[in-house]
């Protein structure tokens, strides 16, 4: 009896390997795109939940919108109750947390220099719950350098106008009756921080607790509107004049929560921003979707 064993030739093996490599090259981008889309959808769902907290905060506080962040008076003031305890200078997200129903911090602190269980100071704690952080940038947990920014200029600029008067807020409280177009007024959105003032190639990667203006996320909890008056207005980078802007991190779109509680995705242009070819966000966009009444006006500091 005689016979022969069949085997793949070298050419056949190379053909099989090439086909596999081709399939992988086709499927990997599709899988990556699907993951990005999943994160974008999850981010939008989170904003809708936060929208419930935004609306409930106003209902339970005499129709007053949440402040951007309580101001610094001294190392232990202002503080306020949030879900899970009492917090030093809570941001709008932490202030809404009781209505959201999820504590943002495992160990909230009432003073600036008091260290929490993770070694973070009371004014730079990290969000411990993912609902307060955009899923596309899960490492942006710093409460100051956050992934979600608030339309603080028009809805709750709680910075002090006069440091000797701890109740001299620049533009807070803001009553919901002042917002004539709640479904057409931005409340919260994905934010890139003060990196918006820099060309795309000059923007730095996010670093927790950093204070570098060129880095993504710096002052991210403060979301500046498209039109800003550099002389008589205000920006997120209060001391150095660097502005923040929405972040189109979801395939060229930013997820947005509106004052009435609904959420959707928008391009920078659709939100009114003007962008140079270098990526720098200009100061002369349109505030029609930010001012509360549909007017294209900048927010100006009270005299």
Image: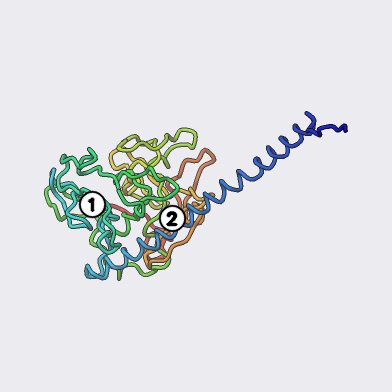
Q: How many marks?
A: 2
* Residue drawn at point x = 23 percent, y = 69 percent: 60
Residue indicated by mark 1: 90
Q: Distance between the residues labelled 1 and 2?
A: 22 Å
Whichever of callouts 1 and 2 sits on the residue coming sooner in the sequence is 2
Q: Is mark 2 on a helix, strand or loop?
A: helix
Compare residues 89 and 288 and report the one nearer the observer.
Answer: 89
**Place of residue 26 in the rendered image (x, y in percent of width and height, measured from the top left):** 66, 44
Vertical side of 61 occupied by 171: above or below = above
Q: How crowded is mark 2: few (under 14 residues within 10 Å), some or many (20 or more)?
A: many
Mark drawn on residue 43: 2
Viewer-nearest of discs 1 and 2: 2
Compare residues 139 and 237 and report the one nearer the observer.
Answer: 139
Which quarter shows the N terminus?
top right
**Looking at this rendering, what residue extends furthest in the top direction?**
10
Vertical side of 156 occupied by 283: above or below = above
Q: Residues within 10 Å of mark 1 (few under 14, many from 20)?
A: many
* Residue drawn at point x = 80 percent, y = 30 percent: 9
């Amino acid at each position: 009896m005689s016979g022969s064993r069949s085997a793949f030739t070298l050419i056949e093996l190379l053909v099989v390997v090439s086909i596999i490599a081709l399939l992988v090259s086709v499927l990997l981008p599709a899988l990556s795109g699907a993951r990005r889309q999943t994160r974008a959808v999850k981010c939008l769902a989170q904003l809708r939940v936060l929208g419930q907290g935004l609306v409930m905060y106003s209902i339970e506080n005499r129709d007053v919108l949440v402040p951007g962040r309580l101001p610094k008076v001294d190392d232990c003031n202002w503080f306020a109750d949030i879900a899970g305890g009492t917090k030093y200078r809570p941001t709008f997200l932490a202030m809404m947390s009781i209505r959201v129903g999820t504590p943002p911090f495992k160990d909230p602190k009432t003073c600036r220099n008091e260290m929490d269980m993770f070694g973070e100071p009371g004014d730079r704690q990290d969000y411990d719950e993912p609902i307060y952080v955009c899923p596309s940038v899960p490492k942006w947990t710093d409460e100051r350098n956050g992934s979600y920014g608030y339309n603080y200029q028009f809805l709750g600029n709680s910075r002090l106008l006069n440091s000797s008067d701890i109740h001299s807020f620049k533009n807070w409280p803001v009553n919901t009756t002042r917002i004539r177009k709640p479904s057409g007024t931005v409340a919260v959105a994905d934010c890139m921080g003060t990196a918006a003032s820099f060309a795309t190639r000059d923007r730095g990667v996010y670093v927790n607790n950093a204070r570098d203006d060129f880095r993504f996320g710096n002052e991210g909890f403060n979301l500046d509107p498209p039109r800003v008056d550099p002389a008589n207005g205000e920006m997120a980078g209060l001391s150095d004049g660097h502005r923040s802007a929405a972040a189109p991190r979801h395939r060229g779109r930013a997820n947005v929560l509106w004052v009435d509680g609904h959420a959707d995705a928008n391009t920078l242009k659709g939100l009114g921003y003007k962008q140079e070819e270098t990526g720098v966000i200009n100061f002369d966009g349109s505030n029609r979707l930010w001012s509360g009444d549909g007017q294209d006006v900048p927010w100006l500091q009270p005299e």
